[in-house]
Image (tube, rainbow, N blue to C red):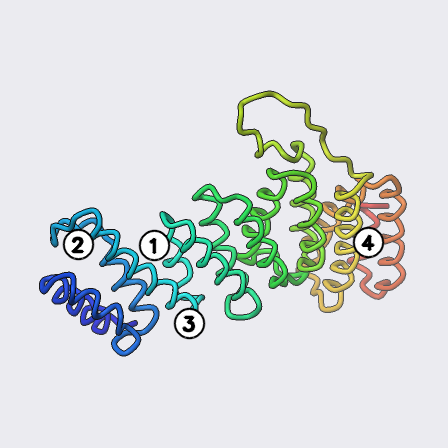
Amino acid sequence: MNWHRREMVRWMVKCATEIGISALIHIMQTWYTLFTPNEAAQVVATTVMSPTTAVQLKLSCQQQEDLNAHARKVALKCAAQDPSSCALCALTLCEKDLMAFETAYQIVVDASNGAMNSTQLFQIARFMEHRGYAVHAYRLAVLAMRNLTLAYNQDSHPAINDVYWACALSHSLGKDELASMLPLVIKSVQCPSVLADVLRRCSLTAPGVGRLQDGKRRCFKLLSYDHAPLQQLLDATISAYINTAHSRLTHISPRHYCDFIDFLGKARETFRLAPDGHLQFMKLIDDLKIMYRGKKKLIQLIRERFG
């Protein structure tokens, strides 16, 4: 929506407001002939439900609720037609009406099949958590993770923070939620540094602490790298480091040799978390020495650092 169009829509709503309730109801009932879904939700419905409009029209409580009901209905229809642009607005406007709110939430769930991408789903999931709907947020985070792909070399991708947030949310809800989330992370994320960070974060505190609502102390156990769900994540992280090492060496230039040595140093820290991690890491080093023996300077640096 460009600036001139937005101002025109606002002017139209302002005119309807000055005329009265009947005019506002009319433009909401015929919104699809006048506005785009984005305009109807973001400008029309939002303006109608604002406290300023209620004060300007001197609405009674019943009149205000009737007008808000029309606005929520518009917001839901807009969200159904254009969920990527209107779903978050619909959730915000419908929050005080449980049935409408759940309808808006279901629209988002249904849109996860293609109408909304992972970034948009994560945004709404974060909104849900911020509003106190942790379980709703978790379910959307699961759907968002299924739509996400992070390649081995995307270690600065903006979605990384969403991955960390989704895992932290799952961890706070409990071991079962974390155990359901981590396989999706493993499938979606090939970047070893991200997987290693997730692994470390999940091991720092016990899962389920976020469910403490009554202030009572309970005994929670830290997760072990030797058991599910962290064992699978550790194995996947090690595999990602191995695959990434070979991928990076395919087109590496001498000026990146030092960065690669640092990469191997970080990889070794993760390998050491596994019972046979030292052996796995040394096998990787030996494989690199054989497969890339033509890169004499690189092999020399590897020998100096790792033997």
Q: Is residue 180 above or below residue 43?
A: above
Q: Amino acid at mark 3?
A: Gln
Return the residue at label 4: 300
Q: Earlier in the sequence, mark 3 or mark 1?
A: 3
Front in this rendered view, residue 279 or 157: 157
Toward the front, the furthest residue is 62
Marks 3/1: CA–CA distance: 16 Å
Neighbour tally class for label 1: few under 14, some 14-19, many 20 plus, Cα within 10 Å: many
Marks 4/1: CA–CA distance: 63 Å
Question: Does dot 4 land on a helix, a strand or a loop?
Answer: helix
Front in this rendered view, residue 70 or 192: 70
Return the residue at label 2: 53
Residue at horizontal 15%, vertical 51%?
Answer: 59
Residue 256 located left or right of residue 139: right
Q: Amino acid at mark 4?
A: Gln
Neighbour tally class for label 3: few under 14, some 14-19, many 20 plus, Cα within 10 Å: some
Marks 3/4: CA–CA distance: 61 Å
Mark 2 or 4: the one toward you? 2
Which image quadrant for residue 26? bottom left
CB atoms at circles 4 and 1 under 8 Å apart? Answer: no
Marks 3/2: CA–CA distance: 26 Å
| Dot label at residue 93 | 1
Residue 31 horizontal/vertical position (percent): 27, 72
Q: Is residue 302 above or below residue 269?
A: below
Q: Amino acid at mark 1?
A: Leu
Residue 197 horizontal/vertical position (percent): 65, 45
Neighbour tally class for label 4: few under 14, some 14-19, many 20 plus, Cα within 10 Å: few
Residue at horizontal 29%, vertical 67%?
Answer: 40
Return the residue at label 3: 81
Q: Earlier in the sequence, mark 4 or mark 1?
A: 1
Marks 2/4: CA–CA distance: 74 Å
CB atoms at circles 3 and 4 under 8 Å apart? Answer: no
